[in-house]
Image (cartoon, rainbow, N blue to C red):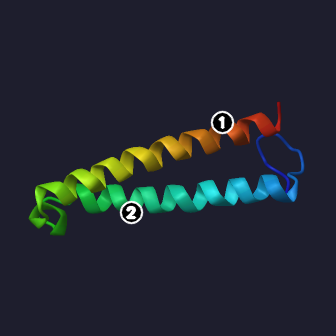
Amino acid sequence: MTTEATNFTLQPHQQRVVDEKRELDDKLTKLRAFCSQIGGIFDALPTEEKQRLTEQEGHMAAYSDVLQRRIAAFSA
C-alpha cells in the first residue's frame, strides 16, 4: 500500500502495524464513548469496574501512541 502523506509503499509487516493501529483506535473510540455516556451502563457499574475500564483506556491510548511512533518511523 502506498501512503498518501509520504508517497511510499509499505512493506507487509508495516501495513499490519497500520491496520493494527486503525483497529485499536476504533476500539478505543468505542470504549471512550461507552465510558462517557451520561446515564449509561458505565455509570451503573461498580466503582472497581469503572476503574479497570479507565485503566484499560489509558493502556490502549499508550499502545496507540507507540504504534503511531512506529508508523512515523517507517518513512524516516
Q: Horizontal placement of 70 versus 43: left or right?
A: right
Is there CB contact under 8 Å for labels 1 and 2? no
Name the outermost residue toward the front: 48
Residue type at mark 2?
A: Lys
Residue 41 location (% of width, % of height): 17, 69
Q: Which mark is residue 4?
A: none
Rendered residue at 14%/65% (across/down):
45
Count of marks overlaid on the render: 2
Q: Please tell me in which quadrant of the rendered image residue 47 appears.
A: bottom left
Name the image quarter holding residue 33.
bottom left
Give percent across and percent down for residue 55: 32, 48
Residue at 80% from the left image edge and 39% from the top image edge: 74
Is residue 18 positioned above or below 74 on the image?
below
Q: Residue placed at 49% from the left, 41% from the top?
A: 62
How far is the residue under mark 1 from the one under mark 2? 22 Å
Q: Residues within 10 Å of mark 1 (few under 14, many from 20)?
A: few
Label 1 or label 2, whichever comes before in sequence order: 2
Disc number lying in front (1 or 2) = 1
Residue 48 or 19: which is nearer the viewer? 48
Q: Secondary structure at mark 1?
A: helix
Give the camera-side residue of 19 and 4: 19
Amino acid marked by disc 1: Arg
Badge 2 is on which residue? 30
Position of 40 compared to 2: left or right?
left
Q: Secondary structure at mark 2?
A: helix
- Say which quadrant the C terminus sits in: top right
Q: Could you say where residue 5 lies in the image, as x and y percent from the top left? A: 76, 41
User: What residue is disc 1 on?
Assistant: 69
Horizontal placement of 22 versus 52: left or right? right
Quadrant where the image shows the N terminus: bottom right
